[in-house]
């Protein structure tokens, strides 16, 4: 838990610690008696708000929200001997993360909380089993607990949202930098250019303050404004930033010193060269890593890896909301793949994975998305597709895969089959939902004897 969360935990503890058993029991009594009424009221008010109803109108959300809102309130406000504060806090974090995932705006959540507080006050006014002189205190306690829960949710929301935004941003950078290897060569050349200019200017006896700064060079500008962002989080990024700062702010100013002997000058240049070498090295590592991982491509099959799955699914869901069309998630898992490795070796296993990837790619339209989820499992997002077509496509893929032999080294041929789980987008705003459904369907297909497509209910 972060430092901020720990602060909230301390506040939470302090708040509850200062309350008498009587006050806590009064609050629990009123909330538990009216939890259904409160949940109904919340739902009714929110459905009247057009911006909120988008997130709530799906049948499953509607169905579950009633129940979960009721238990959420009861759990938050029933502080008795079974009360587990850390579990309650963990629940608020989870809710915040879900809100971030489905893009519920924070103001809607706060509006919901206000709605609940208003209704609670009315209900408390009618409670005959809470003395009138305790009403004010009881309402204050309810509000404080709600506020703490909101604070926790907002914090989790912010962290998650930020992470999601960074991934989307990385995706954007990925899509605009068409060719990472061109960028790599360009930046290596730019770095070399700066180094050459520095050596030349220094040899010409140019004044120190006119020597080219690496941070202002073509490379420095690129790295500070784009590279550092694209390679965010990697240790090498910080090392490059530090090395550039060392060159510009520590080493280059030394050339200003009067009476710097030629030998000392050469020594300083050598140090700069050492730092530049380090930058070259770290840059290569960053590009190496990013060409495989950060680019979102799986090393072996060249399909997308999981990295951009949230970005792709969120966009597809938004797209469907606007266009009223559907998409489908098809999970494909090669049957008994372990046997291939065991019988023909890992290299042959790799070849099989590559050929299956090609097979699947050839069976898709260019608008579809293909991911390798790990191991021998693939995910295909069939965009803009109707349910019967999705099933037909899946069946075609399955039969084709089973019919076409794959090539192993030494011209050996191998027939494989795959099990598939198909889930159709049902309007649920959380992308995890469709993935879980596809996963359940795949499980059914495996259990049903493999080499078959199962459609999620
Ligand atoms: N060659 C190769 N094998 C891999 C790779 N990734 C995962 N595997 C292997 O894939 C196998 C997956 O085995 P299981 O999960 O038991 O599944 P399975 O044998 O396909 O059986 P079912 O899915 O139940 O039909 C394991 O033996 C992994 O070692 C890879 O990149 N290359």
Image: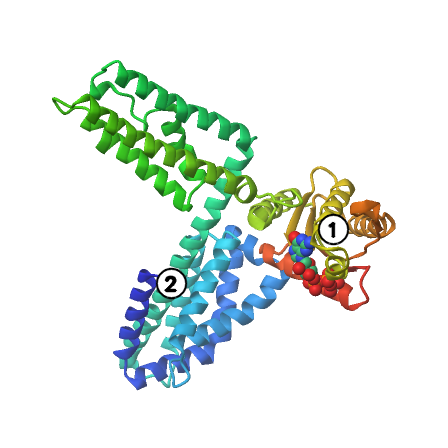
Eyeballing the image, is 356 above or below 14?
above
Q: Name the residue under label 1.
A: 348
Q: Mark 2 points at which residue?
A: 152
* Proximity of marks 1 and 2: CB atoms separated by less than 8 Å: no
Residue 2, located in which quarter of the rendered image?
A: bottom left
Eyeballing the image, is 250 above or below 12?
above
Specify few, some or many for label 2: CA neighbours under 10 Å numbering under 14, 14-19, or 20 or more.
Answer: many
- Distance between the alpha carbons at the discs numbered 1 and 2: 50 Å
**Residue 456 visible in the picture:** no
Q: Residue furthest front?
A: 263
User: Which mark lies nearer to you, 1 or 2?
Assistant: 1
Task: Tell me: is circle 1 under 8 Å from ligand 1.
Answer: yes
Q: Position of residue 336 (x, y in %)?
A: 76, 62
Q: Position of residue 280 (x, y in %)?
A: 41, 33
Q: Quarter containing ligand 1?
A: bottom right
**Residue 371 visible in the picture:** yes
Label 1 element class: helix
Residue closest to the eye, 177 or 193: 193
Q: Position of residue 443 (x, y in %)?
A: 72, 65
Q: Position of residue 63 (x, y in %)?
A: 60, 67
Q: What residue appears at the point 38 percent right and 80 percent down from the top-left corner?
A: 79
Quadrant containing the N terminus in the rendered view: bottom left
Residue closest to the eye, 208 or 389: 208
Whichever of labels 1 and 2 marks the residue nearer the N terminus, that label is: 2
Residue 248, located in which quarter of the rendered image?
A: top left
Specify few, some or many for label 1: CA neighbours under 10 Å numbering under 14, 14-19, or 20 or more.
Answer: some
Compared across the picture, whether 62 is left or right of 31 comes to right
Name the image colouring: rainbow
Q: What residue appears at the point 38 percent right and 63 percent down from the top-left corner?
A: 152
Query: What's the mark number on residue 357?
Result: none
Q: What residue appears at the point 60 percent right and 43 percent down from the top-left corner?
A: 297
Eyeballing the image, is 214 above or below 132?
above
């Amino acid at each position: 838990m972060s430092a901020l969360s720990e602060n909230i935990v301390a506040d939470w503890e302090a708040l509850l610690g200062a309350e008498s058993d009587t006050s806590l029991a009064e609050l629990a009594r009123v909330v538990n008696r009216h939890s259904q009424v409160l949940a109904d009221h919340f739902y009714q008010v929110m459905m009247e708000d057009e911006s909120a109803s988008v997130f709530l109108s799906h049948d499953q959300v509607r169905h579950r929200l009633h129940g979960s809102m009721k238990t959420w309130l009861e759990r938050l406000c029933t502080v008795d001997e079974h009360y587990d504060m850390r579990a309650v806090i963990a629940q608020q974090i989870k809710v915040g993360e879900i809100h971030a995932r489905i893009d519920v705006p924070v103001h809607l959540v706060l509006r919901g909380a206000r709605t609940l507080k208003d209704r609670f006050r009315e209900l408390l006014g009618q409670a005959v089993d809470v003395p009138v002189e305790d009403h004010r205190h009881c309402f204050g306690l309810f509000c404080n607990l709600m506020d703490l829960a909101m604070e926790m949710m907002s914090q989790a929301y912010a962290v998650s949202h930020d992470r999601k935004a960074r991934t989307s941003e990385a995706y954007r950078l990925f899509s605009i930098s068409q060719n990472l290897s061109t960028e790599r060569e360009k930046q290596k050349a730019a770095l070399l250019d700066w180094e050459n200019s520095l050596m030349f200017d220094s040899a010409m006896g140019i004044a120190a303050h006119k020597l080219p700064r690496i941070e202002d060079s073509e490379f420095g500008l690129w790295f500070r404004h784009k590279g550092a962002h694209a390679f965010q989080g990697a240790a090498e990024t910080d090392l490059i930033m530090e090395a550039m700062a060392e060159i510009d702010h520590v080493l280059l100013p030394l050339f200003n010193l009067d009476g710097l002997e030629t030998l000392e000058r050469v020594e300083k240049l050598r140090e700069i060269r050492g730092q530049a070498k380090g930058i070259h090295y770290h840059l290569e590592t960053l590009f190496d890593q990013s060409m495989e991982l950060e680019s979102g491509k799986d090393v072996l099959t060249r399909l997308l890896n999981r990295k951009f799955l949230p970005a792709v699914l969120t966009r597809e869901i938004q797209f469907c909301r606007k266009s009223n069309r559907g998409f489908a998630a098809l999970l494909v898992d090669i049957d008994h793949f372990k046997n291939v490795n065991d019988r023909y070796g890992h290299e042959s296993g790799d070849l099989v994975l590559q050929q299956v990837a090609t097979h699947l790619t050839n069976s898709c339209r260019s608008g579809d998305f293909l991911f390798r989820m790990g191991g021998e499992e693939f995910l295909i997002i069939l965009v803009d597709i109707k349910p019967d077509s999705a099933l037909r496509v899946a069946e075609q893929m399955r039969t084709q895969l089973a019919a076409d032999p794959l090539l192993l080294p030494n011209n050996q041929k191998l027939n494989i089959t795959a099990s598939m789980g198909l889930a159709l987008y049902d309007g649920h705003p959380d992308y995890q939902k469709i993935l879980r459904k596809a996963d359940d369907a795949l499980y059914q297909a495996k259990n049903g004897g493999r080499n078959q497509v199962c459609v999620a209910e």
